[in-house]
Amino acid sequence: MKKIFLYTLVGSLCFSACKKDDEVVGYQEPADIATQDSYDDQSIKKFMDENYLDVQGNIKPFSATDTADDKEKKLSALPYETLPSGTIYIMREGAQPTTSPQTIKTDDVIKIMGRGYSYLAAQTDGKVAFASQAVFFNTIDGYAIPSIDPMYYYVKKKVMDDATLADAKKAKYYQIPGFREALQKFSAFNNLPSETPYNLQGVIIVPSRAAFARNPHYPYLTMSYRNRSFVFNFQIYGRSDRPADQAQTPEQQQ
């Protein structure tokens, strides 16, 4: 029994060591933030060159062996806008609301369908690209239902009032500025039923400097998002005015 326990312990330690090695392979945090910013921008360009949108607006990688996607336009060939923060957004043609489009405001309650992933932009063997993909949200695969009022868009006053950490009493601890900024360029649909089949409106790509950068932040999914960029592929099913008692104070917005 002692030998079994010993072997199990050694195996666990080896697995932990290997896992730790895997987590750091290909990425060393640059001392200069400007270098990380450059890695982000280079990785975003590469990502946009290597992916396209399918008939439902899903981001798909080009296949090296299947010719079926040869006529698809890469993301970088679609009309897109780059905001001063470095955030990029793509409005998918033919997928925007035409009946009663709703303006999205900075403090709205939003109803979002889609996927979001975070990435580390890293240099490996002299090449810069996104690595370490991690799910941030996914309301399409599995139990397909939109997410309502996510904190990364707007965090309620009470959440910050109840926080014990000083950093957690500020909206920037929870919210992703680049996503918020770009989403307001889109219009929401007029409260589509949750079971409505999705037709994704577009893409928002947020470099780490327009996300959490190297600042303290809320540990969504128990992860660190230090230096991580985000890619959102989404549709806004609806928006509504926020109740007054949920509104952030000016101090919380600083």
Image (cartoon, rainbow, N blue to C red):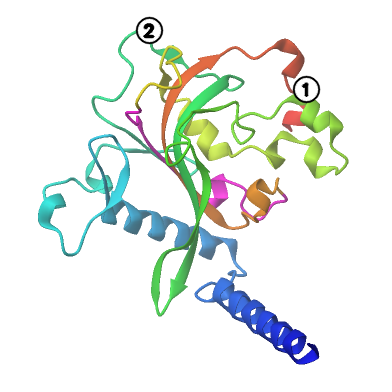
Look at the image and tell me whether residue 68 can be seen. yes
Q: Is residue 44 above or below residue 197?
A: below
Secondary structure under badge 2?
loop
Q: Residue beneath label 1, please?
A: 249
Q: Is residue 145 above or below residue 61?
A: above
Q: Residue beneath label 2, please?
A: 100
Q: Position of residue 25 (x, y in %)?
A: 53, 76
Residue at x 74%, y 33% (from the top left corner): 254
Q: Is residue 176 left or right of residue 84?
A: right
Magenta-drawn segment: 198-216
* Figure quadrant of residue 234: top left
Q: Is residue 250 above or below residue 18?
A: above
* Figure quadrant of residue 248: top right
Q: Nearer the viewer, residue 247 or 116?
A: 116
The amino acid beneath tag 2 is Ser
Q: Position of residue 135 (x, y in %)?
A: 51, 50
